[in-house]
């Protein structure tokens, strides 16, 4: 994974897409910064955060993902791998379906995922510092360079979706205390059923995690 570090950028996700449009895709590429002025969150919301937090976006080809991974559930896959690394470092972070990082009952970050042709774009924001009362922050100190290096090494292993899912379905029970947004409406996850492809069955509707 080639990593480009920027002191400041409007959005790592936007910058990355424009970079690929201009230069083409040659190899997996990551853009990382500790401050973005116009970050993109899920459903088009902003995720600007605060200087000193972690913002990165990366692009990989579909061929660099495990064969058994349903493409519509990539956001769970990439989020859960990062969560596992943070967990091994001593954090109590967990993933709320489908793409949010939580410490206890507070969101500390999230993932957005988009596809274009055979390329997958993933953007991740993580609060390392306090931002505001409604949000939390990571409960351990991390070295960003080491964290990213370990993260991309794990991605390169192409860990099977089956292996990730077996762990995530246990953790999914924590999500049932919360709500998610479906068709611009808040919906309780209390009675949601997690399917093997990462989607959920809620209110007689199948909802996928790709955002």
Image (spheres, helix red, strand yellow):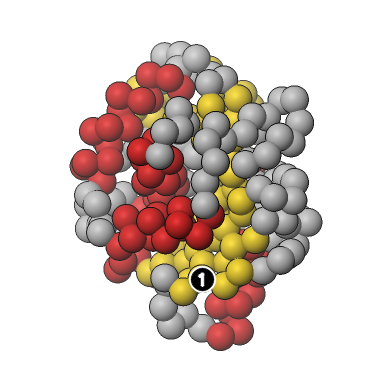
What percent of the width, then of the height, locates residue 114? 51, 57
Q: Residue at x 50, y 14 (%)?
A: 177
Comparing 207 with 153, the one in front is 153
Comparing 60 with 49, the one in front is 49
What percent of the width, then of the height, locates residue 89? 40, 39
Whether 37 is drawn above or below 205: the answer is below
Whether 29 is drawn above or below 107: the answer is below
Q: Label 1: which residue?
A: 3
> Would residue 156 be found to the left or right of residue 25 on screen?
left
Q: Secondary structure at mark 1?
A: strand
> Would residue 169 be found to the left or right of residue 47 on screen?
left
Whether 177 is drawn above or below 79: the answer is above
Residue most extreme to the bottom = 23
Q: Residue at x 26, y 57 (%)?
A: 158
Mark yes or no: residue 70 visible. yes
Q: Quadrant of residue 202?
A: top left
Q: Residue at x 38, y 19 (%)?
A: 173
């Amino acid at each position: 994974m080639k990593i480009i570090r920027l002191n400041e950028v409007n959005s790592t996700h936007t910058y990355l897409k424009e970079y690929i449009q201009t230069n083409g895709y040659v190899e997996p590429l990551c853009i990382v910064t500790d401050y973005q002025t116009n970050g993109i969150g899920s459903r088009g919301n902003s995720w600007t955060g605060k200087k000193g937090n972690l913002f990165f976006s990366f692009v990989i080809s579909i061929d660099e993902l495990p064969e058994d991974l349903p493409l519509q559930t990539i956001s769970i896959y990439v989020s859960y791998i990062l969560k596992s690394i943070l967990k091994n470092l001593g954090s109590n972070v967990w993933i709320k379906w489908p793409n949010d990082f939580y410490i206890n009952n507070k969101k500390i970050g999230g993932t957005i995922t988009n596809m274009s042709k055979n390329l997958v774009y993933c953007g991740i924001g993580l609060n390392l510092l306090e931002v505001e009362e409604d949000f939390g922050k990571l409960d351990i100190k991390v070295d960003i360079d080491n964290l990213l290096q370990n993260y991309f090494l794990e991605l390169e292993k192409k860990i099977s979706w089956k292996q990730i899912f077996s762990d995530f379905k246990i953790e999914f029970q924590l999500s049932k205390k919360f709500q998610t947004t479906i068709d611009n409406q808040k919906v309780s996850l209390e009675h949601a059923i997690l399917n093997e492809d990462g989607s959920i069955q809620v209110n007689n509707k199948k909802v996928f995690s790709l955002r």
